[in-house]
Image: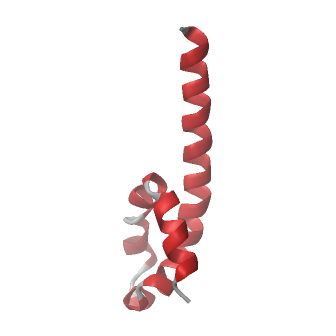
């Protein structure tokens, strides 16, 4: 049982780290590609998107690459 918990925590940590790295890129660079109105927003407002971006990065990565 202990090994299952360790594996789960490792997978969750990797997911969160990838989400954080993608989230920082998305909030400051990629979000403007999806929504051009964010171009005029302040960086502090964009940081409000970070928690949601970390949680949903697999969906946003596809949306980011589809929008050009």
Quarter of the image holding residue 13? top right
Q: Is residue 12 above or below residue 60?
A: above
Residue 36 horizontal/vertical position (percent) = 42, 91
Q: Is residue 29 visible?
A: no
The residue at the point 42 percent across, 73 percent down is 46
The residue nearer to you, when weighing 24 against 66, is: 66
**17 or 41: nearer the viewer:** 17
Q: Residue at x 45, y 83 (%)?
A: 34
- Position above or below: 54 against 43: above
Using the image, determine if residue 63 lies above or below residue 7. below
Residue 12 found in image quarter: top right
Query: Is any atom of residue 3 visible in this view?
Result: yes
Is the residue 12 above or below the residue 53 in the image?
above
Q: Residue at x 37, y 73 (%)?
A: 45
Residue 30 x, y percent position in the rendering: 54, 78
* Left or right of 29, for residue 36: left
Q: How many marks?
A: 0
Query: Which image quarter holds the C terminus?
Result: bottom right
Please state which of residues 57 and 66 is positioned toward the viewer in this rendering: 66
In the rendered image, residue 17, in percent from the top left (x then y), is placed at 61, 47
Can you give x and y, in whole percent of width and height, for residue 39 in the image?
45, 89
Residue under the image location 45 percent in, 76 percent down: 43
Name the outermost residue toward the top.
1
Colour treatment of the image: secondary structure
């Amino acid at each position: 049982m202990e090994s299952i918990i360790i594996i789960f925590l490792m997978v969750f940590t990797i997911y969160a780290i990838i989400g954080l790295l993608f989230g920082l890129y998305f909030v400051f660079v990629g979000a403007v590609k999806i929504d051009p109105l964010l171009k005029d927003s302040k960086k502090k407002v964009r940081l409000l998107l970070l928690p949601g971006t970390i949680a949903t990065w697999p969906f946003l990565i596809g949306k980011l690459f589809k929008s050009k």
